Image: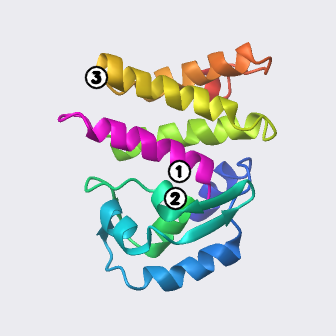
Amino acid sequence: MRAMLEELERSDETEPEVAEETLEDLDGELAAVEFPATAKEVVESVGDYRVEATHGTYDVAQLIPRSEMEAFDSPEAVRMRIQRPTVASAMKRIVEAAESHPRMSIDGSQREAYERTFRELIAIDAVDDDEGVTAVRDWILEQITENETLPGSRAVRKQAARVCRSSGYVVRDDEWLGA
């Protein structure tokens, strides 16, 4: 029942940008990693592995932060993270910026909310070169640098809605970004 509910919730998500075959090849590389593993261990082991996506090629090190604070329970968790390189690279920058401050870290629910916001931005218009993701990522980084705080998920969603509306996209109040 839980799996069915998750599937229904994800039914409107955009398709992953990385082909399944590429991820299957990555599994062989991840066999050398002992799970659970930190993101840093994953990057050190398979960071130079190249991932072909619809909008380019990425090294795993470009998508996963070199972090001791983030961990993966399994190879599937790594695969899920890099399926959407646009979101993964934005989150990598945010996690690394947050780690540069001694008392700052992104917990699981906040990370999930940030990622969902980025996925929603991509879904609004997949042809806009992900300008919305870049704008919101830069805004979050600015909040970390200038205010030394991570904005809450609601603030991030509101900023994402502002970015969308300023670009002429309609964001209804009953949508994720319409917080």
Quadrant in the picture for the C terminus: top right
Q: 16 and 89: which one is in front?
A: 89
Whole-Å distance between the Cαs marked 3 and 1? Answer: 22 Å
What residue appears at the point 73 percent right and 53 percent down from the top-left corner? 55
Q: Amino acid at mark 1?
A: Ala
Does the CB distance between marks 1 and 2 fall below 8 Å? yes
Q: Position of residue 90 (x, y in %)?
A: 52, 42
Instruction: Give the answer, above or below, for where 120 lies relative to 177.
Output: below
Q: Which residue is mark 1?
A: 88
Does the CB distance between marks 3 and 1 fall below 8 Å? no
What residue appears at the point 57 percent right and 46 percent down from the top-left corner? 87
Q: Does the magenta segment cover residue 107?
A: no
Q: Is residue 53 left or right of residue 147?
A: right
User: Callout 1: few (<14), some (14-19), or many (20+) C-alpha neighbours within 10 Å?
Assistant: many
- Residue range corresponding to the magenta coloring: 83-105
Q: Amino acid at mark 3?
A: Glu
Labels 2 and 3: the sequence-earlier one: 2
Q: Is residue 81 left or right of residue 164?
A: left
User: Callout 2: few (<14), some (14-19), or many (20+) C-alpha neighbours within 10 Å?
Assistant: some
Does any portion of residue 1 appear in the rendered image?
no
Q: Which residue is mark 3?
A: 148
Secondary structure under tag 2 reads: helix
Q: 117 and 89: which one is in front?
A: 89
Labels 3 and 1: the sequence-earlier one: 1
Rendering quarter of residue 99: top left
What residue appears at the point 73 percent right and 21 percent down from the top-left corner? 171
